[in-house]
Image (cartoon, grey):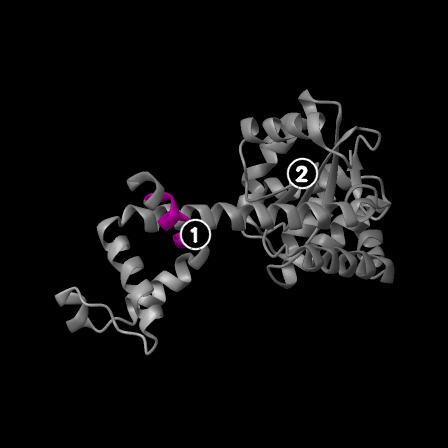
């Protein structure tokens, strides 16, 4: 009978959720809480049930933690399922847009990075990305220009897309991302010169309306997916925020190789 009663109360706890439990406890006056008396409902049966639940939770406080963990796990699963739907709905825009620079366009496993040239975590991720592309030729890596940290970031993204027109996107991207000093317009154009770009042409191409359209499209795509920070990665059907390490990245690639339906 004790086991059955515990099971019943666990179900009750899961059904009412943390919010309901919190309301019951928070709304108990301090004086009543100290004396162990629950706030009474106007309905006798409701008051009796509330008292039973409250007294049980006070005797078994670890149940609150269990309820919270289950609700958090459920919420996480729902968020992951929602993101998978968004990735599938935006498959072409994410993985195969002609607007983006793509390393190994015929690679089976898509990895997309939304980044900003002033983002310190994006800079930290650069060696991981470079190592992955050297060691796994099946990865199709997509660079998504996503300037969100101010006007200099926007200038850098415009310059990178203009560098693509001269066939030097990757070297410009990697060199600019590797800079450890403060990013300025001067540093952007000096980097362009250092990697062999025609800077005068670069500045003209940066004003091309097509570049503005690409950046606008990337921002709209990010917004539709709930992406607000950098770096943000999409590996197969998984969304991963932040600068993850090489081992975690390769594990995600292997998971995508085994399970991805959009690859």
Residue 163, position in %: x, y? 79, 46
Q: Is residue 167 left or right of residue 130?
A: right
Above or below — where is 107 with respect to 243?
above
Q: Give above or below for 99 relative to 248.
A: below
Mark 2 and mark 1: span between their CA atoms? 50 Å
Q: Residues within 10 Å of mark 1 (few under 14, many from 20)?
A: some
In the rendered image, is residue 181 in sight? no
Residue that mark 2 sits on: 174
Give the image quarter of residue 101.
Answer: top right
Residue at position x 79%, y 45% from top?
Answer: 91
Q: What percent of the width, then of the height, locates residue 95?
A: 79, 41
Whether residue 188 is visible to the viewer of this picture, yes or no, is yes
Instruction: Reply yes or no: does residue 21 show up in magenta.
Output: no
Do labels 2 and 1 touch, CB within 8 Å? no
Residue depicted at x 59% and y 59%: 149
Residue closest to the far top: 135
Q: Residue furthest front?
A: 1
Can you say whether 6 is above or below 263 in the image? below
Residue 8 painted magenta: yes
Identify residue for label 1. Answer: 14
Q: Nearer the viewer, mark 2 or mark 1?
A: 1
The residue range painted magenta reads: 6-13
Which picture quadrant has residue 25? Answer: bottom left
Instruction: Farthest residue to the left: give it.
Output: 35
Q: Which quarter of the rendered picture does the N terminus lie within?
A: top left
Helix, strand or loop: magenta stretch: helix
């Amino acid at each position: 009978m004790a086991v059955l009663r515990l099971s019943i109360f666990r179900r009750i706890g899961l059904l009412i959720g943390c919010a309901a439990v919190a309301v019951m406890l928070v709304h108990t006056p301090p004086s009543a809480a100290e004396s162990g008396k629950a706030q009474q409902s106007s309905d006798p049966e409701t008051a009796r049930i509330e008292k039973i639940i409250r007294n049980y939770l006070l005797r078994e406080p670890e149940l609150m933690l269990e309820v919270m963990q289950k609700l958090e796990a459920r919420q996480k699963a729902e968020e992951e399922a929602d993101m998978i739907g968004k990735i599938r709905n935006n498959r072409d825009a994410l993985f195969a847009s002609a607007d983006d620079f793509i390393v190994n366009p015929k690679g089976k496993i898509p990895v997309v990075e939304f980044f900003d040239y002033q983002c310190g975590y994006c800079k930290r991720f650069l060696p991981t990305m470079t190592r992955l592309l050297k060691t796994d030729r099946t990865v199709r890596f997509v660079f998504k220009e996503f300037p969100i940290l101010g006007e200099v970031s926007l200038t850098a993204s415009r310059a990178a897309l203009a560098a693509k027109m001269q066939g030097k996107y990757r070297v410009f991207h990697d060199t600019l991302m590797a800079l450890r000093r403060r990013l300025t317009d001067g540093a952007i154009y000096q980097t362009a010169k250092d990697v062999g770009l025609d800077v005068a042409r670069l500045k003209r191409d940066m004003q091309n309306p097509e570049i503005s359209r690409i950046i606008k499209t990337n921002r709209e795509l990010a917004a539709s997916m709930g992406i607000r920070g950098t770096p943000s990665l999409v590996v197969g059907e998984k969304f991963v925020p932040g600068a993850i390490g090489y081992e975690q990245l390769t594990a995600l690639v292997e998971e995508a190789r085994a399970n991805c339906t959009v690859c």
